[in-house]
Amino acid sequence: MATAASAQGAKDYVYEWEGKDRNGKIVRGEIRALGENQVQATLRRQGVLPVKIKKRKMRSGKKIKPKDIALFTRQMATMMKAGVPLLQAFDIVGRGNANVSVGKLLNDIRSDVETGTSLNGAFRKYPMYFDSLYCNLVEAGEAAGILEALLDRLAMYMEKTEAIKSKIRSALMYPISVVIVAFVVVTVIMIFVIPSFKQVFTSFGADLPAPTLFVMGISEIFVKWWWLIFGVLGGGFYFFMQAWRRSEKMQIFMDRALLKIPIFGVLIDKSAVARWTRTLSTMFAAGVPLVEALDSVGGAAGNAVYALATNKIQQEVSTGTSLTAAMTNANVFPSMVLQMCAIGEESGSIDHMLGKAADFYEAEVDDMVAGLSSLMEPIIIVVLGSLIGGIVVSMYLPIFKLGQVI
């Protein structure tokens, strides 16, 4: 049986085999396994008498990303709707995937399913790629006999979630990249350009204006301590990111701080609401009980503030409080979401109303990203212009002063 370790690159091999089936016909194929004995055992279970087995080392693949899992889910849903058997669908998707790592993972899962493991049980062996939300929905689909419908809904959910994340990253990437470029440009000016001006000004033998002295002082710090500046910034950023990833208190603090950032905080908040409502809507539509569904919803929001609020909601709902009342007590959800949830509870269509709320906030995120792109350009131009222009003016002030004396 394939293991989680093997999926992550430990002794990964593909065996090309040739053998005879029950009718004595020559058959050929390939199979991934940890050893030749495992290949022989698998072939015998399939009614094949192995004649020749040849080992071939697998190529290393790229890292498996969420969009790879979303694509796999969409392909599986499409094939199962078309009537393709589950194991054959795994074969087709695994062999046709451009990422070798995905092929390894799917072959491992296929081997588990082939030996009698349920599909959701096979997925649960790889929590790095299939979270509890994914596995719970697959389990619900298997139990209800609607696996292809649940995979289709799951694929749609993942595609929408990845689309929101991509838009958030694109909105934040532009200002961050410009700030980094600006820092590099200012550093080059401070280390290489300003010292040349300093040598010229020293020969003047006159008092220099305060802005010029200030810029020259900063330049001296850069020239003398550039290695320390870059070391502190690089090391500080690394340790900050590690603390953000590993410390729960740091995650809560940063997620709260992010929601309070002007403009961007609103964008992050709306995207979290969109993911929260979309996730709960998907779980409800799959027939997952509310208390159990809330286990997966908090983490799917992508923000610790909403994760903590979800834990509180889950506790209140488990004691008999209505979902709308519990969400109101959490004090993080917009009034529109609360109203639509209340209507859904009264009409018995919570999944539909939460889906509508998710559609609305996903559209809001789209509009905000488009608006931010046009808004950030003039702001960044003004900031960079003021910074670079201030340095240039400061260094030319002594020249202007000298011209007035002459």
Image (cartoon, rainbow, N blue to C red):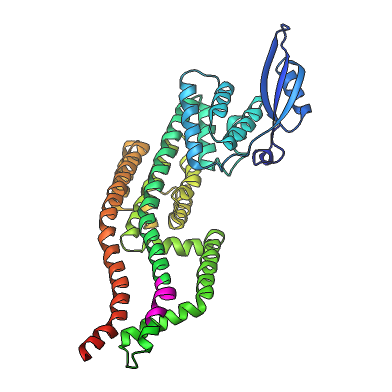
Residue at the limit of the structure toward the top, as seen here = 23
The answer to whether 154 appears left or right of 175 in the picture is: right
Report the side of 374 relative to 240 (left or right): left
In which quadrant of the rendered image does the N terminus lie?
top right
Report if residue 196 lies within the magenta region. yes
Between 286 and 339, the one lying in front of the other is 286
Above-or-below relation of 182 to 63: below
Q: Residue at x 33, y 84 (%)?
A: 212
Query: Residue 123's x, y, as percent?
Result: 59, 36
244 to 145, vertically: above or below = below
Residue 128 visible in this rendered orientation of the protein: yes
Q: Main secondary structure of the magenta part?
A: helix
Q: Nearer the viewer, residue 61 or 120?
A: 61
Q: Is residue 112 magenta?
A: no
Give the magenta part as a residue range.
189-197
Q: Position of residue 97 (x, y in %)?
A: 53, 31
